[in-house]
């Protein structure tokens, strides 16, 4: 009996050992195929003829339907356009920013894109330490007073222009002459969206009334969909027929509330923010007429192209902003409104029109 | 643990009067039997490595190459070992912060809160004391320990005074800590405006940075020393004996005259102090300022470490080191192969699952398996 138990234990050990051997053999047979894969194509990035692009996310994934994904797609497009090699690393811990950027600088990558304002300081530090690599900080602002590196630029977006376009559309379309906006924390980028929206609406329709509400400060200002929904409902009850939801999940809550309201998509509409929210908040499609977007992918692609040719213009590169496609609402918007809005958006981009927004 | 009615002694504490009643050929097996918790962990690690290998293979990458990359990146690359040890140090301490209350039969899920609130207060204090040079480091660490101990003692006092379950209070205190911290760094005393508008405290003096000596971070040395000290305390001192007795049977301990409430309070104060020290060390040794992202999941990782270490303080060192290696190597793994770094968390989770469920031990050792460990029984005490 006892011997039998030992036998079982022995058999288990043997089995375990057998499995190890098995695992080992799988490993050795596979290593060849992986070595010849695409992953090792960055072996000679130091060569001037080989253009290598790296991207580091800010503790997010490259399919987050937001900044990381848009930047990732922009970098991929740039690699395709310039015949470069592209690779990314997804950061798991904010303490790893430097180490993750070092993965690329160690391999002498030509360009490293870092995503999101959380990486601002780490990017500036890395740029100072690796003068041969060019750094592009998406949504980052480098203060010329403290940052002297030339191999560094931060992409900023004219949020007021996107807000202006959205407000202009709302101002032309509103039947009640009342529109509203539900916003995240009262910080400069959100304020620019909000003031642009108000200015655009007033420019299109001087009679329009704009209700503006910011989230009262708290750690969930951008992640409070319940509050966003309640505020959106309040504004609808007061007669607003356009709601601009700008503030991460808080704004998304507002959008979804509008989509649930009676007359959603016919008499009341919502406007998304940052990226085309038709894809990111499908629950809001019923009312989502457009989104006030930062054109992240395009700006990343363009800035990488600049880096490939030579030096950056300066510490700040202005990206562009505009409106997302109208999707299902394309047929519901009168043709003359569309023409006017398109003209306003393109005039803002070209500089022929100013939003007049100051903080 | 030692209530087996069977005559052959199968558990470690009763091995002394062990007559050589087994045939000599089975000596190895009896050794394995006595050390079965190590065997279980090794088998669990092996099993999760194999499952991980299958998942890596499924993504078209050689598992052997992937594991090699992780270890090379974490240990052999220039500066890799230092980074691994930097990651290991707080993990040891947050692991100990779970281990010690576990020995008393308490489940401290508040490591995260104790960690971050200490880091925040230590960060503010060290910034305020930035004229003090090296002294700011000492002050910061002390403040971290004190704040952590105080924070954990709230849960302990509620437990001893009103019998509130520590799992509930520690979890809730985590959220309270997060709220206080957000206030501190946005509008409160720790607010510091940097160019990128990230809520954080001001940078501390270079003189108050925690040094790395010859590639070994001081924080790791302190953490490892504390782990050994805790091991000694638990196994060799009256206090440790009291801790274990209360953990095994509260009522018997009370009958024997052990002040249960004081033991509960003391264990939580120690745990909070250790987690708080980890928080202060992250401020002084890694970030050099405080921002809410400093916590990551370190507090909760402590639970993983404690279960991997089977609530043995000294084993938290290798357990934390393993987690440190995997975490450090993950980014390099993605760089080299394109596999998402989360594979590492997956492997850890599988390991934990295999270690915590008693099935593995019973499957290997049948009736000779150890009775379920403290780690699995402390719930609902």
Image: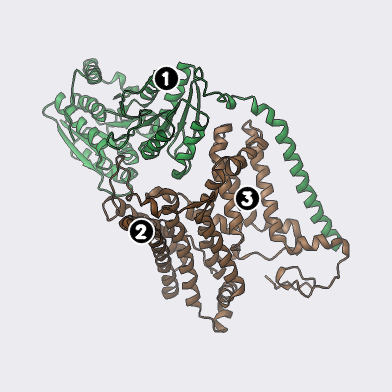
Chain colours: A green, B brown
Q: Is residue A339 left or right of residue B327?
A: left
Please report contact status of discs 1 and 2: CB closer than 8 Å, yes or no.
no
For the image shown, how many numbered marks are present on the structure?
Answer: 3
First in sequence, mark 2 or 3: give its number.
2
Q: Are marks 2 and 3 on the same chain?
A: yes
Count residues near mark 1 (Cα–Cα under 10 Å), then give few for <14, some for 14-19, many for 20+. Answer: some
| The C terminus of chain A, quarter of image | top left
Vertical position of residue A226 compared to residue B21: above or below? above
Vertical position of residue B55 compared to residue B151: above or below? above
**Quarter of image, res B66:** top right
Q: Is residue B317 left or right of residue B23?
A: left
Label 2: chain letter: B
Q: Which mark is residue A308?
A: 1
Q: CA distance from mark 1 to mark 2?
A: 45 Å
Say whether residue A65 is visible: no
Q: Residue furthest left?
A: A207
Q: Which is more foreground, mark 3 or mark 1?
A: 1
Count residues near mark 2 (Cα–Cα under 10 Å), then give few for <14, some for 14-19, many for 20+. Answer: many
| Image coords of residue B51 (percent x, y) | 66, 42
Q: CA distance from mark 3 to mark 1?
A: 46 Å
Label 3: chain letter: B
**Quarter of image, res A321:** top left
Q: Give the residue pinned by disc 2.
A: B121
| Image coords of residue A117 (percent x, y) | 35, 37
**Closest to the observer: B205 or A98?**
B205
Q: Secondary structure at mark 2?
A: helix
Q: Which mark is residue B351?
A: 3
Q: Which mark is residue B154?
A: none
Q: Secondary structure at mark 1?
A: helix
**Closest to the observer: A26 or A163?**
A26
């Amino acid at each position: 009996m006892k011997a039998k138990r030992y036998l079982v234990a022995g058999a288990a050990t043997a089995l375990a050992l057998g499995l190890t051997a098995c695992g080992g053999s799988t490993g050795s047979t596979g290593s060849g195929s992986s070595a010849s894969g695409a992953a090792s194509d960055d072996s000679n990035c130091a060569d001037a003829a080989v253009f290598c692009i790296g991207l580091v996310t800010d503790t997010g994934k490259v399919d987050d339907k937001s900044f990381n994904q848009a930047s990732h797609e922009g970098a991929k497009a740039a690699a395709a356009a310039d015949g470069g090699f592209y690779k990314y690393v997804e950061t798991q811990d904010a303490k790893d920013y430097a180490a993750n950027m070092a993965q690329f600088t160690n391999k002498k990558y030509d360009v490293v894109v870092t995503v999101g304002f959380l990486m601002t300081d780490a990017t500036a530090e890395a740029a100072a330490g690796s003068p041969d690599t060019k750094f592009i900080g998406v949504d980052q602002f480098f203060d010329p007073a403290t940052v002297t590196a030339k191999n560094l630029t931060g992409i900023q977006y004219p949020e007021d222009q996107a807000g202006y376009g959205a407000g202009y559309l709302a101002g032309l379309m509103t039947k009640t002459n009342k529109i509203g906006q539900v916003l995240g924390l009262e910080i400069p980028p959100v304020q620019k969206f909000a003031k642009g929206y108000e200015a655009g609406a007033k420019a299109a329709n001087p009679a329009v009334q704009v209700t503006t509400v910011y989230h009262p400060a708290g750690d969930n200002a951008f992640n409070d969909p319940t509050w966003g929904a309640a505020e959106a409902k309040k504004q609808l009850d007061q007669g607003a027929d356009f709601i601009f939801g700008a503030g991460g999940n808080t704004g998304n809550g507002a959008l979804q509330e509008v989509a649930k309201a009676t007359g959603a998509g016919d008499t009341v509409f919502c406007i998304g923010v940052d990226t085309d929210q038709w894809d990111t908040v499908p629950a809001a499609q019923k009312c989502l007429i457009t989104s006030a977007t930062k054109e992240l992918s395009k700006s990343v692609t363009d800035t990488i192209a600049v880096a490939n040719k030579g030096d950056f213009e300066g510490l700040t590169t202005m990206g562009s902003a505009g409106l997302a496609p109208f999707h299902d609402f394309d047929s519901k918007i009168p043709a003359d409104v569309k023409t006017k809005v398109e003209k306003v958006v393109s005039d803002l981009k070209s500089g022929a029109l100013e939003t007049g927004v100051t903080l | 643990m030692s209530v087996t009615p069977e005559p052959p002694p199968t558990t470690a504490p009763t091995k002394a009067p062990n007559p050589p009643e087994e045939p000599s050929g089975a000596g190895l097996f009896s050794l394995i039997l006595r050390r079965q918790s190590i065997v279980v962990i090794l088998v669990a690690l092996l099993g999760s490595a194999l499952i991980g290998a299958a998942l890596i293979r499924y993504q078209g990458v050689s598992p052997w190459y992937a594991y090699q990359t992780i270890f090379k990146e974490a240990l052999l690359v220039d500066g890799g070992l230092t980074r691994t040890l930097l990651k290991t140090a707080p993990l040891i301490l947050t692991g100990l912060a779970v281990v010690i209350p576990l020995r008393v039969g308490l489940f401290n899920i508040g490591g995260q809160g104790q960690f971050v609130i200490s880091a925040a207060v230590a960060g503010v204090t060290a910034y305020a004391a930035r004229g003090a040079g090296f002294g700011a480091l000492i002050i910061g660490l002390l403040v971290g320990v004190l704040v952590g101990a105080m924070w954990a003692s709230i849960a302990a006092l509620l437990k001893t005074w009103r019998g509130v379950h520590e799992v509930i209070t520690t979890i809730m205190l985590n959220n309270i800590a997060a709220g206080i911290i957000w206030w501190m760094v946005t509008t409160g005393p720790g607010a510091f405006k940097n160019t990128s508008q990230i809520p954080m405290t001001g940078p501390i003096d270079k003189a108050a940075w925690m040094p790395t000596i010859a590639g070994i971070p001081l924080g790791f040395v302190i953490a490892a020393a504390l782990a050994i000290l805790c091991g000694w305390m638990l196994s060799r001192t009256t206090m440790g004996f009291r801790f274990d007795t209360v953990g095994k049977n509260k009522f018997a301990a009370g009958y024997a005259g052990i002040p249960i409430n004081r033991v509960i309070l003391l264990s939580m104060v120690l745990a909070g102090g250790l987690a708080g020290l980890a928080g202060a060390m992250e401020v002084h040794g890694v970030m050099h300022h405080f921002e809410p992202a400093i916590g990551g999941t370190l507090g909760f990782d402590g639970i993983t470490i404690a279960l991997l270490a089977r609530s043995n303080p000294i084993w938290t060192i290798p357990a934390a080191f393993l987690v440190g290696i995997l975490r450090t190597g993950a980014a390099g793994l993605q760089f080299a192969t394109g596999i998402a770094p989360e594979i590492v968390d997956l492997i850890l989770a599988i390991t934990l699952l295999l270690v915590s469920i008693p099935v593995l031990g019973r499957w290997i050792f049948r009736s000779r398996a150890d009775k379920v460990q403290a780690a699995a029984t402390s719930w609902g005490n």
